[in-house]
Amino acid sequence: LVASQLLPGLLGADYASFKMCSDTLLYVCLAFIMINVGREFEIEKGEWRSYVSDYFIAMATAAVPWIFITLYYMFVMLPSVYWGDAEAWKENLLLSRFAAPTSAGILFTMLAALSLKNSWIYRKIQVLAIFDDLDTILLMIPLQILMIGLKWQMFAIVGVVVVLLIAGWRWQARWNVRQDWKRILGLSAVVCALTQALYIVTARWYGPENSIHIEVLLPAFVIGMLMKHREIDTPTERRAATGISFLFMLLVGMSMPLVTGASAASKSVPAAAAATSITASQPMMPWGVLILHVVAVSALSNIGKLVPVFFYRDRKLSERLALSIGMFTRGEVGAGVIFIALGYSLGGPALIISVLTLVLNLILTGGFVVWVKKLALKSCTPEA
């Protein structure tokens, strides 16, 4: 975030080339992360009915924080003149999606380290966290269509999504391929290249406004689903995966616009006047007010994640609460949604608040982990 405010001034005219390279690298890292999320998606297709209730609980866990923050951005952050504006709703629905995804990796690692891999909490959180990310990916599709409008590209995007989902379900865990970090990174580069090539070709044929842009989230996730999961737990693999996640989060922070709005406007034109979206046209707030909004949005997002407490009534309250608090953790998918929102020229104070809320939740992850650990050990006995 600090670098994002300093680099435009330091690089000057070279910043545009640097931004293009960093964005490409960011998409490759995001595809790498999503392939690994897809690899974790393991369900018994013959027992799909047993997952139906879990899927809808996960969907509610992803949707409630999203709805809460959308309403907050609309009715607290925007003037009343925009409350009935369809464009404002579309922008804030997309920008609020960052609140939905749960970081699956840290939960699985933490519970496994506690020797609780056979516990109900581990099995259930494994299903809910993956479904939570899947819901985020799938709900990005109608949001993307809303942003594009009713054009023929919409039907092309829906067609691609349907084909990908059918392929992922039909051939789940069938692809017997090497799964070390080098192979996955290579596949990530291929996914990024194909989606970018589709955009470039259609932009050349029909113009940038009528091009087809498929985000890397779903194609990468489906490739992970197709792989016959092999766990490679070596120090080299862990270092590589951690390094790529670190690089991704660094690049997301560096992608943020200038808080002053100077990057969106020339020196002679105010940023609000140069903005192409309603969110970006809003005047920047004092830092004290921004921090209050960050705390409020963080609280709303985590309150919305308490949905599992109201289900699974056959389990102890401490188990249900541990399950819900485990869903508080945020990760790379939420950061990816914020980066995608930048591509639609969304900005202004709502974007800064979204970024800082993600940062705050990342800082609080250690506390969430300790809390879940205490609740889990109350209800479960570690295996020998």
Image (tube, grey):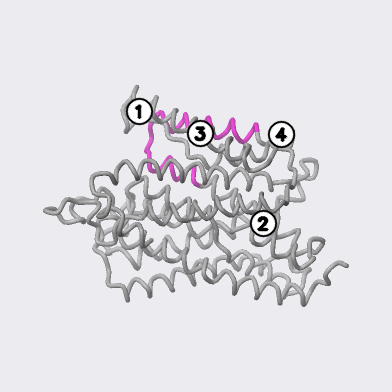
* Residue matched to label 2: 128
Q: Position of residue 185 (x, y in %)?
A: 58, 40
**Is the residue under label 2 in contact with that under label 1 (CB below 8 Å)?**
no
Give the residue type at disc 4. Answer: Val
Marks 3 and 2, the one that precedes in the sequence: 2
Residue that lies at the very extreme toward the right in this rendered image: 384
Q: Nearer the viewer, mark 3 or mark 1?
A: 1
Residue at 46 percent of width and 51 percent of height: 337
Give the residue type at disc 2. Answer: Leu
Q: Nearer the viewer, mark 2 or mark 4?
A: 4
Q: Position of residue 370 (x, y in %)?
A: 65, 74
Left or right: 112 with respect to 356?
A: right
Magenta residues, as a range? 140-167
Dot 2 falls on a residue whose secondary structure is: helix
Q: Position of residue 138 (x, y in %)?
A: 55, 44
Mark 2–mark 4 distance (CA, rounded to whole Å): 27 Å
Mark 3–mark 4 distance (CA, rounded to whole Å): 28 Å
Residue at 67 percent of width and 42 percent of height: 180
Mark 1 is surrounded, within 10 Å at the Cα level, by few (under 14), some (14 to 19) or many (20 or more) other residues, namely some
Q: Nearer the viewer, residue 224 or 48?
A: 224
Mark 1–mark 2 distance (CA, rounded to whole Å): 38 Å
Mark 4–mark 1 distance (CA, rounded to whole Å): 34 Å
* Residue matched to label 3: 158
Give the residue type at disc 3. Answer: Val
Marks 4 and 1, the one that precedes in the sequence: 4
* Residue matched to label 1: 203
Mark 3–mark 1 distance (CA, rounded to whole Å): 18 Å
Q: Nearer the viewer, mark 3 or mark 4?
A: 4
Give the residue type at disc 1. Answer: Ala
Marks 3 and 1, the one that precedes in the sequence: 3
Q: Nearer the viewer, residue 131 or 219?
A: 219
Marks 2 and 4, the one that precedes in the sequence: 2
